[in-house]
Image (tube, rainbow, N blue to C red):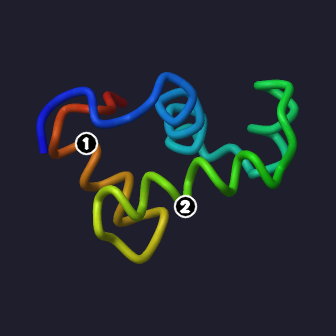
Amino acid sequence: MSKGILTAREQEVFELLVLNKTTKEIADNLNISEKTVRNHISNTMQKLGVKSRAQAVVELLKLGELTI
């Protein structure tokens, strides 16, 4: 996987996820529905081939897609 695998919105969702925000907090923060937040997370997990949000975060950190 190369850099830039996330859409801008997926990036925003995961940046908030890393900060321990809940799905509802992320939705409120980005002014989108909780279902949309879950869809972004699910799409990212599929792209990365992982089964959990935590695994997705670890992979994104490894790939340099996220910084803490």
Q: Residue at x 41, y 77 (%)?
A: 51
User: Is residue 64 shown above or below 56?
Assistant: above
Instruction: Please give left or right for residue 27 compared with residue 53 in the image.
Output: right
Q: Nearer the viewer, mark 1 or mark 2?
A: 2
* Residue closer to the observer: 14 or 68: 14
Residue denoted by label 1: 61
Amino acid type shown at disc 2: Ser
Task: Identify the image quadrant of residue 56.
Answer: bottom left
Viewer-proximal residue, 9 or 27? Answer: 9
The answer to whether 57 is drawn above or below residue 55 in the figure is: above
Q: What's the mark number on residue 14?
A: none
User: Which residue is painted at 77% across and 25% down in the image?
Assistant: 30
Q: x%, y% of residue 64?
A: 19, 32
Q: Earlier in the sequence, mark 1 or mark 2?
A: 2
Residue 32: give x, y in percent of width and height: 83, 33
Q: Quadrant of the C terminus?
A: top left
Task: Give the amino acid at mark 1.
Answer: Leu
Instruction: Give the residue at mark 2.
Output: 42
Residue at image location 43% in from the left, 63% down from the top? 54
Does residue 20 appear left or right of residue 53 in this picture?
A: right
Label 1 element class: helix
For label 1, count other residues whose C-alpha is less than 10 Å away and answer few (under 14), some (14-19) or many (20+): some
Element under disc 2:
helix
Q: Nearer the viewer, residue 64 or 43?
A: 43
